[in-house]
Amino acid sequence: MPATEPERLVVDDYVRHLNTALTSHNASLPAEERTQLRMAVGRDAAEVDRLIGADAPRRIFRANKDAHLVLLLTDGIHADVVAAQGHTSPQEFVNIRIREKEFLGNVWVWTPRHDLAFVVRPDESRPRPILTDLYGPVDARQAVLRGGAW
């Protein structure tokens, strides 16, 4: 994407028009001939490449045979564009954790009119604080607790 393009237009308007075009293109095609597009938006080319190559978009397409588009946003793009500038439907984004080669990070996923809750696997979701101490959240999922007198 050229640096002169406003990110909000790409992440919101362009993606919606692209989905409309893909839907129209795929309407009369048999399932095995339909185009399914993985699109990632970030500020680092290597990071975008890892998002495109990750398993999460493939799982979305396997689970939603009629999906035409999967949009993946880096945390920075989501924070700067979706959260800060507004988006037509920010509640439709799902936050997942992706590990792909040397990339490990939180990514925001959007697929028009599809439920993405199944995409979040326990090993990819953000750690949920189970205990808190004076210094902040503690992830105690791997803790071994023993009974007995304290």
Image (cartoon, rainbow, N blue to C red):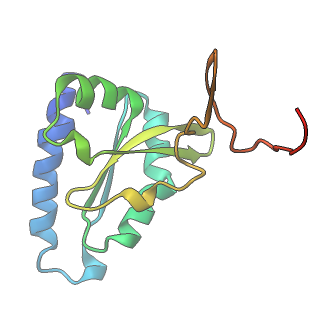
| Residue 90 image position (x, y, % from top left) | 22, 39
Specify the farthest residue to the bottom. 30
- Residue 113 is situated, as x and y percent measured from the top left of the image, at 20, 60
Q: Is residue 8 left or right of residue 60?
A: left
**Residue closer to the observer: 89 or 80:** 89
Compared with residue 132, is residue 146 higher up or lower down, i.e. above or below? below
Farthest top residue in view: 134
Residue 56 in picture, x, y percent from top left: 46, 56
Answer with the quarter of the image where residue 67 lies: bottom left
Question: Quarter holding the C terminus?
Answer: top right
Residue 5 in view, yes or no: no
Q: How many marks?
A: 0
Image quadrant where residue 4 sits = top left
Which residue is at 15% across, 52% downward? 18
Q: Is residue 14 above or below residue 68?
A: above
Question: In the displayed structure, does residue 63 sit left or right of residue 53?
Answer: left
Residue at left 23%, top 22%? 84
Q: Quadrant of the N terminus?
A: top left
Q: Is residue 43 visible?
A: yes
The quarter holding residue 19 reads bottom left
Say above or below: 46 vs 24: above
